[in-house]
Structure formats: structure tokens, C-alpha cells
Image (cartoon, rainbow, N blue to C red):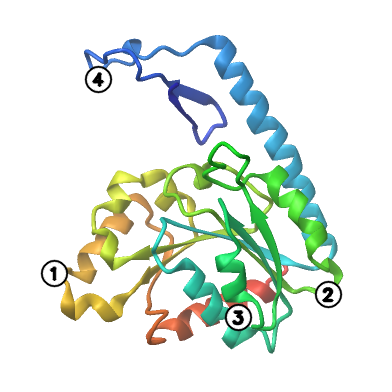
Amino acid sequence: MGRFHRHDDGTVHTHDHDQPDHDHGDHSSYRTGAQRIEVLEAIFAENDVLADANRAAFESNGIRTLNLMSSPGSGKTSIVAATLDELAGELAIGVIEGDIATDLDAAKLSGRGAQVSLLNTSNGFGGECHLDAPMVNRALPGLDLPGLDLVIIENVGNLVCPAEFDVGEHAKAMVYSVTEGEDKPLKYPVMFRSVDVVLLNKIDLVPYLDVDVDSYIAHVREVNAEAEILPVSARTGAGMGAWFGWLRRFATDSGA
């Protein structure tokens, strides 16, 4: 079974790697069955219809929605927890908490002044590695939408698939930890290219690691010249004020 992705123009391309690839520069070595592509295009089309429906539901209730992505272990849930501690008193926030299994992250966020709707993707066969629009649509009844200002969708930890699915958000953000290595923007350009904000987390560890923050930022800039890059530490609170300020502006923006 090969991997697939959707290009910026909406076309779907598959790469089946179960056969030897004798020439990495020649796409003729990839097998791209027309029937498979048609199925994938149908999946994306169905997703986009429900993404529009989700966005309409948010907008009809005056809600701004953020899709927050990252790799596992980057500190995404800790960022959300700190965000709720800071902003839940001034903004009515809902969280759609996506995870393959367990309610551990949802439990970490409970009691912080936000509505939390848990969304497990486990289907008995391992679970989906990302959230899509139909999943988010199923999570909406767990939130009292008319009473909310901001919804944060915490996506499943993965640096590949989540970036390819519109779930009805108004913006995308990601958490990128200094412990992941400075090369990740170059290895996973689709994710980094898709976001409006990059939170470079765990900067409190810089004195103990052989890392150069400027190199991390430069590599993000190679694939995304426009994203706002905010060095932060969810643990110490360093830099988090800039993130809170961005979210305040985002939550009160009626949208262009």
C-alpha cells in the first residue's frame, strides 16, 4: 500500500513503494492506479464538503477555530493547558481533543475553564493518524457552540497527514520542539508550509542541548516565509505572552 498526498491545486497523487524504485528521479517508477486515485479524490471531496459545513457551523455562532498540530511529544497539550489557564477567563473556549486512544490529554485539560470534547480515532485496528472533517463534525455535539468564542482542535500527533485535511478551521498552527532536531521543516515541508504560526517549544532546554535556535527558525523560513514563529516554553512560560496575544487577536478577528 502506497502513500498519497494532495497537491496545492487539489489533485491527488499516489506513490506505491511496494515495488523496487530503480530511479528516484523518474515518476514512471511509481504505480498510480486510476481507480485508486478516483477513490482518494472522492475521500478528499467528501472531507471538504463536511469541512465547509463545520466552518459554517462555527461562523454562524461567531466562533474562530484553530487547528493545532505537531509531532507526538512536542508539548502540544501542555501548550493548550497553559493557554486555557491564561485565556479561559476572558474567552469562552472549546477544545476538540483528538487522540488515537485514551482520555489522558482530555483529562489534563479538564477543570481549566474550557469545554472539552474528546475524539478518539481508534477503530480497533490501530486508529487514524489524523483528524478529518467528518470526525470533527461528530465531535461538535460535545460543545455548546452558541456559548463559545474560540475552538481549538488539538489534532493527532503526526507531522504528515494532519496537514492535508481541512477540518473547518480558520487557521492552522503547529508546535515544534527543539528536541526534534532543526531539520524537521526540511523533512516535513507540507506540514510547515501549511501553518500560520509555529510555536518553537521547549526553549528552556536550549542551554542543555546542542541546538541553535536561529538554525531552527532559518529552516522554517526555507519552506514558509510568512508564518509567525514564536519561541516559547510551555513549562516555564517564556515567550508564551506572544502566543496569548496572537490568539487574542485571532479570536476577535471576524475573518477576512
Q: CA distance from mark 1 to mark 2?
A: 46 Å
Decide which of tag 1 and tag 2 comes sooner along the chain.
Answer: 2
**What residue is shown at x 61% (from left), y 68% (from top)?**
106
**What residue is shown at x 35% (from left), y 17% (from top)?**
18
Q: CA distance from mark 3 to mark 4?
A: 47 Å
Decide which of tag 3 and tag 1 comes sooner along the chain.
Answer: 3
Quadrant position of residue 237: bottom left
Q: Which mark is residue 25?
A: 4
- Reading the image, the residue beneath label 2 is 147
Please tell me whether residue 47 is drawn above or below residue 32 in the rendered image.
below
Badge 1 marks a residue whose secondary structure is loop
Amino acid under label 4?
Gly
Decide which of tag 2 and tag 3 comes sooner along the chain.
Answer: 3
Badge 3 marks a residue whose secondary structure is helix
Q: CA distance from mark 2 to mark 3?
A: 16 Å
**What residue is shown at x 42% (from left), y 57% (from top)?**
72
- Reading the image, the residue beneath label 3 is 84
Q: Where is the C terminus found, in terms of image quarters?
A: bottom right
- Reading the image, the residue beneath label 1 is 210
Badge 4 marks a residue whose secondary structure is loop
Q: CA distance from mark 3 to mark 1?
A: 32 Å
Q: Nearer the viewer, mark 4 or mark 2?
A: 2
